[in-house]
């Protein structure tokens, strides 16, 4: 049973569509492992449906409906502007979880970002017991990494800009704030210094995302962006 | 092109599936008002029927009904989040086209129509404006951890959940309801919302938390 969850604001951001992709990837993968947060996010999305409905309607173009019907006639499909999440780490978009026992199978959506399974990940060794693999490198301002820590291994003490979320996928680790196992999310702010230590009974694999300031696009946000310029 | 020419079949004769029937039963048991509400919105049974007609018989008239209600709302949702008129119009048309294409995937047991369309609009905006993918869990994924502790009301139909949430929002203290709406219309961290409203960050966070607790209680998910 998962005990450490993303904070409430992070879940609200995800439900409202404000999370940037690296954080959304971590939240969505946590949701696959945490029925409790799935219910929470489902309720938030239901609020989104009510907000959509109660929102003051805008005028649509006079010919909107005809335009959509004409696209229907043409067999037009709105394509995604984004390539599917494959090949981040080489390999195909992940199909079924393969070759791994259930307790460490990588759920979607992360599985799609690593080419199907942990076997496909190209690890880069950082120290004797620690290896990492970077994902989503094009997202400047974010660091998205898979971390693999050997049994009993330590991540060097670190601090970071912004917030850091660490989702445990396999094994467990302990830091100054608690013990985390599969499905748990550890949160750290820039003013926290922590040193995770992997459990002694096996390797620990985590997804770690360090975030950066949001770009503001709402009406209030635009104002703040302008104010921030001066 | 006139709608009537496209579809001479009267949509009212379309037989709706068992999910609609069970929806109806559940709603009656719960004495939730199924008629048009005070805003004149067609009831959930009408929308459910139209979605079935779209999926099963490519019913353009039914689509016209769904479009008439949702297209202006999808567009204003997108504009409130910063899209200009042309961007919002284009994205809205994409969203409504996706509603047509995916009508067969719409399952009234899983999601209310408003929430289903909200998620399509939300994700289209992320795709087009932010140029990012939207990572989501896959309910069919064998690696997904199933809910071992189904909630007492887990079988509550989605439209009923929607009605319960709408009532619960109406019952919220206005300052909580307003923050909840802002959360969906402002892409701002809570700290910036707090600053703009002249409230301590802790107050914003606790109001939102309280508001969501009320929502979960309304759904029977929390004691």
Image (cartoon, grey):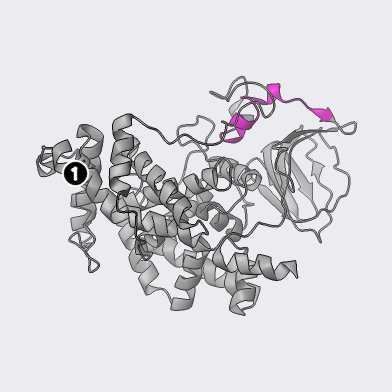
Q: How many marks?
A: 1
* Residue at 57% in and 56% down: A13
Please identify the quadrant where the N terminus of chain B is shown: top left
SS label for mark 1: helix
Residue A51 position within the rendered picture, expressed as x and y whole percent measured from the top left: 40, 62
Q: Which residue is mark 1?
A: B61
Please state the horizontal and vertical placement of residue A145, each as a whole percent of the image. Answer: 74, 38
Q: Residue at x 71, y 57 (%)?
A: A213
Visible in this render: residue B221? no
The residue lying toward the viewer, choosing from B24 and A114, is: A114
Left or right? Give the position of A143 relative to A220: right
Q: Name the image quarter holding residue B192.
A: bottom right
Vertical side of A74 occupied by B172: above or below: below
**For residue A149, side relative to residue A139 (left or right):** right
**Point 64% across, 77% down: residue:** B200
Assess whether residue B182 is covered by the magenta stretch.
Answer: no
Q: Quadrant of the C terminus of chain B?
A: bottom left
**Residue A121: within the magenta?**
yes
The answer to which quarter of the image holds residue B100 is: top left
Left/right placement of residue B97 relative to residue A212 reads left
A4 or B24, nearer to the observer: B24
Q: Is residue A126 above or below residue B198?
A: above
- The span shown in magenta is A107-124
Q: Chain of mark 1?
A: B
């Amino acid at each position: 049973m998962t005990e450490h969850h993303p904070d409430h604001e992070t879940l609200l951001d995800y439900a409202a569509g404000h999370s940037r992709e690296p954080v959304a990837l971590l939240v969505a993968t946590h949701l696959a492992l945490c029925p409790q947060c799935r219910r929470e996010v489902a309720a938030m999305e239901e609020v989104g449906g009510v907000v959509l409905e109660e929102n003051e309607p805008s005028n649509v173009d006079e010919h909107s409906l005809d335009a959509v019907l004409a696209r229907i006639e043409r067999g037009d499909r709105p394509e995604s502007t984004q390539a599917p999440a494959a090949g981040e780490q080489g390999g195909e978009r992940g199909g079924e979880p393969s070759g791994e026992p259930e307790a460490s199978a990588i759920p979607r959506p992360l599985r799609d970002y690593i080419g199907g399974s942990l076997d496909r990940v190209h690890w880069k060794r950082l120290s004797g017991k620690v290896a990492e693999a970077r994902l989503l490198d094009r997202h400047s301002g974010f660091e998205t990494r898979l971390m693999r820590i050997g049994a009993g291994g330590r991540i060097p003490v670190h601090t970071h800009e912004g917030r850091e979320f660490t989702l445990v996928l396999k094994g467990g680790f302990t830091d100054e704030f608690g013990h985390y196992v599969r499905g748990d999310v550890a949160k750290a702010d820039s003013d926290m210094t922590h040193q995770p230590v992997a459990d002694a009974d096996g390797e620990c694999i985590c997804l770690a995302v360090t975030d950066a300031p949001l770009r503001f696009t709402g009406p209030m946000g635009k104002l703040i962006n302008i104010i921030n310029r001066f | 092109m006139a709608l009537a020419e496209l579809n001479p079949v009267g949509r009212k004769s379309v037989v709706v599936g068992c999910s609609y029937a069970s929806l109806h039963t559940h709603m009656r048991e719960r004495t939730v008002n199924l008629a048009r509400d005070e805003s004149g919105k067609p009831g959930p049974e009408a929308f459910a029927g139209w979605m079935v007609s779209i999926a099963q018989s490519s019913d353009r008239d039914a689509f016209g009904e769904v479009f008439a209600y949702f297209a202006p709302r999808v567009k204003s949702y997108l504009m409130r989040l910063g899209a200009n008129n042309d961007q919002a119009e284009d994205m809205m048309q994409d969203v409504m086209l996706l509603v047509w294409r995916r009508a067969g995937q719409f399952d009234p047991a899983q999601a209310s129509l408003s929430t289903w369309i909200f998620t399509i609009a939300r994700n289209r905006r992320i795709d087009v404006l932010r140029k990012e993918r939207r990572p989501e869990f896959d309910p069919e994924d064998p690696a997904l951890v199933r809910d071992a502790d189904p909630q007492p009301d887990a079988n509550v139909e989605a439209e009923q959940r929607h009605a319960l949430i709408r009532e619960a929002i109406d019952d919220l203290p206005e300052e909580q309801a307003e923050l909840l709406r802002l959360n969906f219309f402002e892409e701002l961290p809570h700290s910036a919302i707090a600053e703009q409203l002249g409230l301590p960050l802790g107050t914003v966070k606790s109001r939102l938390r309280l508001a969501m607790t009320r929502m979960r209680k309304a759904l029977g998910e929390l004691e």
